[in-house]
Amino acid sequence: MRRLFLAAPIALLPLPAAAAGDMPNPAAVLAIFYVIFGYLAMAFGYGFSAMRARPAIVGALGFTLILFGGLCSIYGLQKGLHALLVVGAGAFLLAPMLGLGVYLGRRAARRAATRKVLSTSGN
């Protein structure tokens, strides 16, 4: 899996658009950003996998309220609501990657617990 993560950016380098210095397709740029931020969301999901659902949701909502309060105090209510909408849309788009990270984290924890039980029981 690590090889795939390292090979993907290297594979994008020899594209003709990159070699010519021309602007790449906007859909390709969005896909690259989604992959990059998707990996970050998956890493956060892997980290949150040890938490129960309620504290994780309360923590995320607390972070959102702190962000909203800070933006409203600096830029005003209209820009604060706009930023909240953008953050919400981003969270909606990255939710599958976050869920995948939670799934992978819980699967790894379950395997580690099984290995520990098998090593202590002598099998």
Image (cartoon, grey):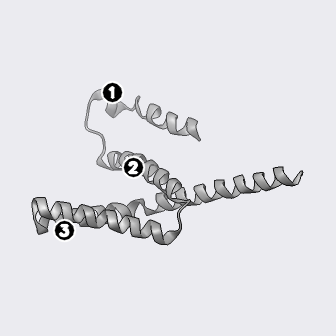
- Answer whether labels 3 and 2 touch (C-beta < 8 Å): no
Left or right of 33? Residue 50 is right
Where is residue 70 shown, x and y percent of the image? Answer: 19, 60
- At label 2, the amino acid type is Phe
Point 21% across, 62% down: residue: 83
Whether pointer 3 and pointer 1 mark residues with C-beta atoms closer than 8 Å, the reply is no
Residue under numbered circle 3: 81
Q: Nearer the viewer, mark 3 or mark 2?
A: 3
Q: Residue at x 19, y 68 (%)?
A: 81
- Mark 2 Cα shell of 10 Å, populated few (<14), some (14-19), many (≥20): some
Q: Which residue is mark 2?
A: 37
Mark 3, residues whose alpha carbon is within 10 Å: few (<14), some, or many (≥20)? some
Residue lying at 43% horizontally and 69% vertically, measured from the top left: 57
Give the structural element (helix, strand or loop) at label 3. helix
Screen quadrant of the N terminus: top right
Q: Secondary structure at mark 2?
A: helix
Alpha carbons under labels 3 and 1: distance apart: 40 Å
* Label 1 Cα crowd, 10 Å radius (few <14 / some 14-19 / many 20+): few
Tell me how many marks there are.
Answer: 3
| Image position of 17 (left or right of 46) | left
* Mark closest to the chain's N terminus, 3 or 2: 2
Give above or below for 30 relative to 17: below
Image disc number at residue 52: none
The answer to whether residue 112 of the structure is visible from this angle is yes
Disc 2 versus disc 1: distance between alpha carbons?
25 Å
| Pair 3/1: label in front | 3
Is 52 displayed left or right of 80 in the figure? right
Q: Quick check: 78 left or right of 86?
A: left
The amino acid marked with disc number 1 is Ala
Query: Where does label 1 land, which residue?
Result: 19
Q: Is residue 89 visible?
A: no
